[in-house]
Amino acid sequence: MLDATARRVLLEAARDSIEQSVLSGARAPFPTSEFSAPLTECRSTFVTLMLRERLRGCCGRLEPERPLIEDVWHNAYAAGFEDPRFDPLAAHELSGLQIEVSILTPLERLDVHSPSELLAALTPGRHGLVLGSGGTRVTFIPHVWEGIPDAAIFVRELRRKAGWPDQGWQTDLEAWRFDVEAFSSPGVTP
């Protein structure tokens, strides 16, 4: 668990990445600053943007490939400008934009061979889920449980996200679960 100062620094970095990019019209470069040890550990994150209580963007990485603060910086930009479900953020949307940072635990491979075994391995509200089959991987972070509190529906919607049939079990299906440490900022006027 990160302390309050580290959480604040990450949320500020996410907001700075977005605001600088909106104002300059281009991806803002990652700052060359010294950061505390917890912020420089190699971790994977997702950044979720909410505007007026509606999803406005969410991007991240499942595997840790860069320092925590750098991952948040880049994922904040991606959530604001590269999420294919949304148009890029505009300056007028910065007011009230809420940012949530989710720091993932390492993926835990599940030894499951049926839908019922998969459902039994999930704790609603706690676990994120990754499903993989045929070269496609899809994920829901735990935040999704807020809108889908039922495990069977959660899995069904994740399968739909991948473009697979709602139900069934592919012979090559793989599953991983993970936990997150999530924290958010209230929407503020820049």
Image (cartoon, grey):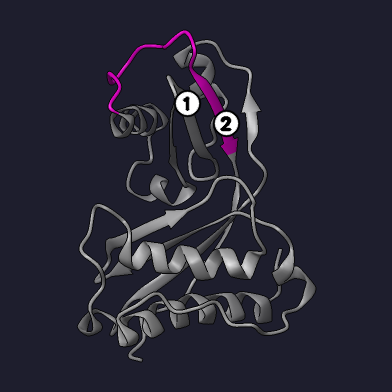
In percent of width and height, residue 119 lies at: 49, 23
In the rendered image, the vertical position of residue 97 relative to residue 40, given as above or below: below
Q: What residue appears at the point 67 percent right and 43 percent down from the top-left corner?
A: 106
Q: What residue appears at the point 30 percent right and 81 percent down from the top-left corner?
A: 25
Residue of label 1: 132
User: In the orientation shown, which residue stands out farthest toward the right?
Assistant: 37
Label of residue 176 in the image:
2
In percent of width and height, residue 60 lies at: 48, 54
Overall secondary structure of the magenta stretch?
loop
Q: Residues within 10 Å of mark 2 (few under 14, many from 20)?
A: many
Q: Name the amino acid type tagged 2.
A: Trp
Q: Name the amino acid type tagged 1.
A: Gly
In the rendered image, the vertical position of residue 133 relative to residue 37, given as above or below: above
From the viewer's side, name the closer residue of 135 and 15: 135
| Of marks 1 and 2, the one in the foreground | 1
Region in magenta = 163-177
Asked if residue 190 lies in the magenta stretch, the reply is no
Q: Quadrant of residue 166?
A: top left
Q: What residue appears at the point 64 percent right and 28 percent down from the top-left corner?
A: 109
- In the structure shown, which secondary structural element does the residue marked by tag 2 occupy? strand
Marks 1 and 2, the one that precedes in the sequence: 1
Task: Quote the CA–CA distance across marks 1 and 2.
Answer: 9 Å
Quarter of the picture holding the C terminus = bottom left
Q: Residues within 10 Å of mark 1 (few under 14, many from 20)?
A: some
In the rendered image, the vertical position of residue 12 relative to residue 141, given as above or below: below
Q: What residue appears at the point 27 percent right and 66 percent down from the top-left corner?
A: 53
Quarter of the picture holding the N terminus = bottom right
